[in-house]
């Protein structure tokens, strides 16, 4: 009893000075399951990525002459290097998957509606940042897939005109583009991610989570912050922590059993590889319409997601009252999955210069 009180006293004294409880947000009863833990789980993946990435950075060389050999060195000679690289790879997959599922959960439950429209856009910024991590990460291993990704990058830079100059090799003659993409991967994108996530978290705390979309057909988007709830933030952390531990176990298994590939040394101007699964639908578009098709289709998808709060303006959360929007975005998701499957089975095509 006395120790329990002493522990509480210590926690309160610590919290008063460090302000940990300021991070808490109200967690309603309906949010204690996997659908509402997906945002937290993408954060868990991000933490694994930072820890493994810091370790890999001690042995990776971001210069074109040595990059691929340094990856081979990490796999062969560095203690724990094989495991760190593969865990990094699988955590990246997990992060993209959980972010996409989190976004679909928010879309399905109408949780982007007033007053959460701006946080929806911040979420889209986070999604773009996460995809930026995957793209720059792919180039770092400096094999054939990396070279092809980079050449696409350069053609897209051309389509962006003046805005694309940073992405082109012409930006500076002193620092190779591989090194600049490495800087983006380890400093610019993490800084952007932390900044966007801070705004995301502050808004979640301010608005509270949206009410349940399923309790009543008339549920609307009123605020939940400050409303009495039986569940607590700590219980929610335990739920996220438990799923996080299970997910971590799966990632460790995959990192040992299904290692990430490292292709042959890069040859410029050749196209024989296919991208990661999340870029696969755009690969299909590219097969038909070339790189400009990929550019415009990616822009159109982000635009379609950005206008979600404008398209679905009714105050109701229940999917049963929002059938049109659910069907429209559901069909878009199915179309993208279909395109991805098609691109996976179709032979790799030549797109550069198309
Ligand atoms: C790395 C990316 C992301 C992280 C770490 C993250 C994290 C979180 C967390 C922890 C929550 C609390 C509830 C939950 O976990 O479901 C949340 C809520 C929310 N997120 Fe995200 N998120 C990310 C990306 C996104 C994306 C891509 C979108 C949409 C485009 C989005 C939109 C929202 C909205 C609107 C809420 C409030 C939901 C509600 O009130 O029920 N987030 N996010």
Image: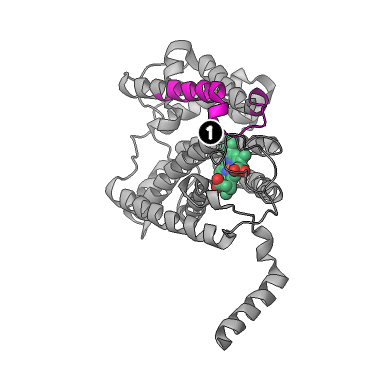
Which residue position is annotated with label 1?
A: 108
**Where does the image place residue 139, in percent across and percent down from the top left?**
47, 36
299 left or right, relative to 38? right
Ligand 1 shown in quarter: top right
Q: Is residue 321 magenta-colored? A: yes
Residue 193: x and y, percent? 61, 45
Q: Nearer the viewer, residue 335 or 279?
A: 335
In this rendering, is residue 161 above or below 204?
Answer: above
Give coordinates of residue 167: x percent, y percent.
60, 29
Relative to residue 102, is residue 56 depicted above or below?
Answer: below
Asked if the magenta segment contains residue 90, the reply would be no
Q: How many marks?
A: 1
Q: Quadrant of residue 219?
A: top right
Instruction: Examine the rendered structure and indicate whether residue 23 appears above or below residue 127.
Output: below
- What's the magenta region? 309-337
Of 39 and 341, which appears nearest the observer?
A: 39
Which residue, as the protein is rendered here, is positioned at the far left? 257
Between residue 23 and residue 206, name the one nearer to us: 206
Please identify the residue farthest to the bottom as the structure is shown: 2
């Amino acid at each position: 009893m006395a120790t329990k009180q002493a522990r509480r006293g210590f926690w309160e004294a610590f919290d008063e000075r460090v302000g940990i409880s300021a991070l808490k947000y109200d967690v309603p009863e309906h949010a204690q399951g996997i659908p509402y833990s997906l945002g937290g789980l993408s954060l868990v993946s991000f933490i694994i990525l930072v820890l493994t990435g810091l370790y890999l950075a001690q042995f990776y060389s971001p210069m074109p002459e040595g990059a691929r050999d340094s990856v081979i060195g990490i796999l062969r000679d560095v203690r724990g290097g094989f495991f760190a690289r593969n865990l990094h790879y699988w955590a990246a997959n997990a992060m993209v998957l959980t972010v996409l599922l989190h976004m679909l959960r928010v879309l399905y439950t109408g949780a982007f509606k007033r007053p959460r429209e701006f946080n929806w856009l911040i979420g889209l910024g986070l999604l773009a940042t996460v995809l930026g991590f995957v793209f720059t990460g792919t180039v770092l291993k400096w094999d054939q897939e990396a070279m092809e990704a980079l050449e696409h990058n350069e053609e897209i830079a051309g389509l962006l005109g003046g805005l694309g100059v940073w992405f082109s090799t012409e930006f500076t003659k002193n620092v190779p583009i591989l090194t600049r993409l490495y800087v983006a991967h380890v400093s610019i994108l993490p800084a952007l991610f932390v900044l966007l996530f801070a705004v995301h978290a502050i808004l979640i705390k301010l608005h509270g989570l949206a009410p349940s979309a399923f309790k009543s057909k008339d549920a609307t988007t009123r605020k939940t912050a400050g409303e009495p709830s039986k569940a607590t933030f700590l219980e929610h952390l335990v739920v996220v922590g438990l799923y996080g531990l299970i997910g971590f176990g799966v990632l460790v298994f995959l990192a040992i059993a299904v290692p990430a590939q490292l292709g042959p040394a890069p040859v410029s101007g050749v196209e024989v590889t296919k991208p990661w699964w999340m870029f696969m639908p755009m690969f299909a578009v590219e097969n038909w319409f070339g790189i400009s098709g990929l550019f415009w289709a990616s822009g159109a998808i982000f635009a379609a997601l950005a206008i979600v709060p404008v398209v679905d303006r009714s105050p109701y959360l229940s999917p049963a009252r929002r059938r049109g929007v659910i069907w429209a975005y559901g069909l878009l998701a199915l179309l993208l999955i279909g395109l991805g499957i098609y691109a996976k089975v179709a032979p790799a095509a030549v797109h550069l210069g198309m």
